[in-house]
């Protein structure tokens, strides 16, 4: 017969095994729950990162497209820019007007050259005087009109200055507004 002591010892061994089994199940459940909790936390951060990555990818594509457009339109932009007089080119512009005067056979004198602010944009106001023949003065005016800029004549005044038996000298006074002027910023 089995003694009580042996029976108790046998049940205690079963109790210890059962206790260990329960403890291991609780630990397993905690590990299992912790894993799913951390997966959920990581999934949220991955979702945030994916959203951010999509937004950055979209921006990168837009920048790439805009860069392509900028490169494709470079020649057209340069052509458009050539129709604007820049502040840094005022001296060469004055020299070209003097050259037009020589070609037309009139002497050109500049009274003033000013950058002024208009209603919408800045413009270049050129006040100049000429002396020479009437046909040369009119030809000079037509050459000014043919400048590759948007030009407005604010004042055009031509008068006979002197007359001799062989020549007639005409004086011109002009105020020209260069509207297609790009003021440097």
Image (spheres, rainbow, N blue to C red):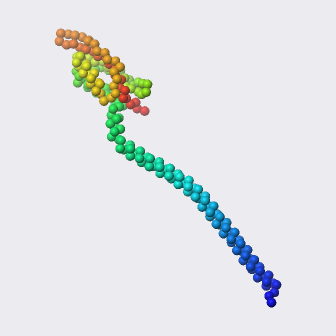
Q: In the image shown, does 83 or 163 lie closer to the viewer?
A: 83
Residue 98 position within the rendered picture, expressed as x and y whole percent measured from the top left: 27, 24
Q: Residue furthest bottom?
A: 1
Name the quadrant containing residue 37.
bottom right
Q: How many numbered tags mark residues here?
A: 0
Residue 149 position within the rendered picture, expressed as x and y whole percent measured from the top left: 33, 29
Name the quadrant containing residue 36.
bottom right
Q: In the image shown, does 46 or 122 lie closer to the viewer?
A: 46
Q: Is residue 129 left or right of residue 50?
A: left
Q: Is residue 7 left or right of residue 176?
A: right
Point out the image quarter for the C terminus: top left
Q: Is residue 68 left or right of residue 170?
A: right
Q: In the image shown, does 10 or 181 lie closer to the viewer?
A: 10
Q: Is residue 102 above or below residue 58?
A: above
Residue in the image at 65% along x and 64% along y: 33
Q: Is residue 72 above or below residue 101?
A: below
Residue 70 position within the rendered picture, expressed as x and y whole percent measured from the top left: 38, 43
Name the quadrant containing residue 96.
top left
Point out the image quarter for the N terminus: bottom right
Residue in the image at 23% along x and 24% along y: 103
Residue 136 position within the rendered picture, expressed as x and y whole percent measured from the top left: 23, 19
Q: Is residue 159 visible?
A: yes
Residue in the image at 72% along x and 77% along y: 17
Q: Is residue 32 above or below residue 97?
A: below
Residue in the image at 56% along x and 55% along y: 47
Q: Is residue 87 visible?
A: no
Q: Residue furthest left?
A: 166
């Amino acid at each position: 017969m089995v003694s009580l002591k042996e029976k108790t010892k046998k049940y205690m061994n079963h109790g210890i095994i059962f206790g260990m089994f329960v403890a291991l199940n609780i630990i397993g459940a905690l590990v299992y729950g912790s894993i799913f909790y951390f997966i959920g936390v990581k999934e949220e951060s991955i979702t945030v990162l994916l959203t951010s990555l999509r937004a950055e990818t979209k921006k990168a594509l837009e920048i790439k497209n805009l860069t392509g457009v900028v490169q494709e339109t470079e020649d057209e932009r340069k052509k458009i820019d050539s129709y604007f007089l820049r502040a840094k080119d005022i001296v060469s512009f004055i020299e070209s007007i003097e050259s037009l005067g020589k070609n037309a056979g009139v002497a050109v004198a500049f009274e003033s050259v000013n950058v002024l602010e208009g209603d919408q944009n800045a413009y270049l106001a050129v006040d100049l005087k000429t002396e020479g023949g009437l046909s040369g003065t009119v030809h000079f005016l037509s050459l000014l009109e043919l400048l590759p800029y948007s030009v407005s004549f604010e004042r055009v005044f031509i008068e006979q200055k002197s007359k001799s038996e062989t020549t007639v000298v005409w004086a011109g006074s002009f105020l020209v507004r260069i509207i297609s002027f790009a003021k440097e910023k």
